[in-house]
Image (cartoon, rainbow, N blue to C red):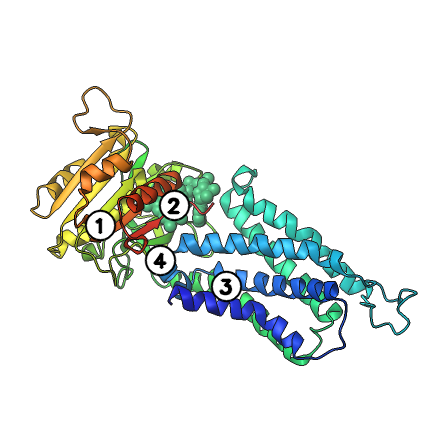
Amino acid sequence: MHPIILFVGYLLITITPLLLGALQNLPPRPLLDEIATGLGMTAFAILLVEFVLSGRFRTISGRVGMDVTMRFHQLVARTALLFILVHPYLYSTSPFGTPLPWDATGELTLGLDTGSLITGLIAWMALPCFVLMAIFRDQLPYRYEVWRAMHAIGAVVIAAAVTHHALEAGRYSADPWLAGFWFVLLGLALASLGWTYVIAPLRQARHPYEVTSVRKIALKTWELALRPKRGDALDFEAGQFAWITLGHSPFSLQENPFSISSAPAERPDIRFVIKEVGDSTRRIGDVKRGTVAWLGDAHGNLTLTGRKAKGIALIAGGVGIAPLLSIARQMRAEDDPRPMILLYGNRVAEQIVYADELEGLSGRPNMEVVQIVSEPRPDWAGRVGLIDRETIGQVFGFEDAAEWLYILCGPPAMLESVEDALLAHGVAGNQIVAEQFYYD
Ligand SMILES: Cc1cc2nc3c(=O)[nH]c(=O)nc-3n(C[C@H](O)[C@H](O)[C@H](O)COP(=O)(O)OP(=O)(O)OC[C@H]3O[C@@H](n4cnc5c(N)ncnc54)[C@H](O)[C@@H]3O)c2cc1C
């Protein structure tokens, strides 16, 4: 779906509770009280939509990218946290059942019963812990899978507490239309969770794969090859990624996202380039041939589809080469006539994958591969340095190169500096597509 439609849809959903509240025409209250209630209701809507945003739906992340979707998810979670923290402090009214002395009619009394006070407090205290645990995920002594399970359970507990609090304590949420809205949103949130943890694994279970080879192809870097045990292989576009589960049940949370490095034209074989970084990737070399594997749907917008380009510039840092290899291989398989330059940077030459194949690509009339290494050994004959503005200028020339499509993949810092360099060379922002491997 187009990003603008998504954004407008998102805004509409988050302001609907305010509109439904305004339509109730309840007697006016002090402005701060209305703001407090408005912030609480908006935060509740944001929290429920968070389930859908993190649900790996291609309709949502297909055009904007999964990394952008996840960054938006993180940003709005922090916004909702702020709203919820402020929410109780803005009320000028008594949160308890007994009217304050100056409120003879009880109109300024929120009338929280013990139950709704407790659920409100639970959400109010749990949400900061929950968001902090997400921000400092990498510093926590838990494996990613354990953190993910805690994140899902925590989200359900908070959503349940807020629902109870809103329906019991809310001045506006008792209204059947608004209550109905909350139930629909809650239903969507739970359905997203059901999709991620039940339906998607069930779909995967019908299409088992097996590992056909695991081999070391560079320093701390492995090639993993899979083939479906039955039926067709995953439908994907060059440049996309998929979540893989190796040797565990598809219902386990032991899945990791990896870009597909082989071309769609090579199906049913599907290959990945995997770098050792953590718990499971460090053990990738121990995976045996014949190990069962499960693949989720293909995601990611690092693709050529629907994009105009006179030429294709692929800029990779380290293992970011994986999706770009898929694109280069597919262009080779289709004899794509457009010029293509692959600029591939590494710290040391030992990190370079498929050196021979890259040399072969470079030998084709419309394709060129430029390698650059930042810490070369004395025998390195290629370029030395980083993929910076100067290197980019030298490699792409920039006459009609500004009308090329630039596809970037690599560490976050590299992506940022390469994007800045391309913009400085006059490349339009919409001609640059980037994806990072880390959802920070
Ligand atoms: C879209 C995308 C494409 C990727 N493609 C590649 C690739 O082609 N080759 C490659 O080597 N690496 C790729 N990665 C990175 C790869 O997913 C992580 O390095 C890997 O999951 C780490 O797993 P681990 O168990 O070894 O490390 P852990 O110690 O478990 O985790 C290290 C870090 O990796 C990230 N991570 C771990 N598991 C997941 C998960 N299930 N979902 C999201 N992030 C996770 C987290 O940030 C975590 O903090 C990609 C990541 C993303 C998001």
Structural crowding at the residue carrying mark 2, measured as other residues with C-alpha within 10 Å and reported as few (<14), some (14–19) or many (≥20): some
Q: Upstream in the sequence, badge 4 or badge 1?
A: 4
Mark 1 C-beta to ligand 1 under 8 Å = no
Structural crowding at the residue carrying mark 1, measured as other residues with C-alpha within 10 Å and reported as few (<14), some (14–19) or many (≥20): many
Secondary structure category for the residue under label 2 = loop
- Residue 96 in the image, given as x and y percentages of width and height: 84, 63
Q: Upstream in the sequence, badge 4 or badge 3?
A: 3
Query: In front: mark 2 or mark 1?
Result: 1
In the image, is residue 285 above or below residue 403? above
- As measured in the structure, the alpha-carbon distance from the residue carrying label 4 to the one carrying label 1 is 27 Å
**What residue sits 18% from the left and 50% below the top?**
329
Disc 4 marks which residue?
A: 299
Q: Upstream in the sequence, badge 1 or badge 3?
A: 3
Mark 4 C-beta to ligand 1 under 8 Å = yes
Residue 97 quadrant: bottom right
Query: In front: mark 4 or mark 1?
Result: 1
- Between 86 and 122, the residue placed more toward the observer is 86
Mark 2 C-beta to ligand 1 under 8 Å = yes
- As measured in the structure, the alpha-carbon distance from the residue carrying label 2 to the one carrying label 4 is 13 Å
Residue placed farthest to the left in the image? Answer: 365
- As measured in the structure, the alpha-carbon distance from the residue carrying label 4 to the one carrying label 3 is 16 Å
Tag 2–tag 3 contact (CB < 8 Å):
no
Disc 1 marks which residue?
A: 402
**Mark identifier at residue 52:** 3
- As measured in the structure, the alpha-carbon distance from the residue carrying label 1 to the one carrying label 3 is 37 Å
**Mark identifier at residue 11:** none
Quarter of the image with the N terminus in it = bottom left
Q: Upstream in the sequence, badge 2 or badge 4?
A: 4
Quadrant of ligand 1: it is top left
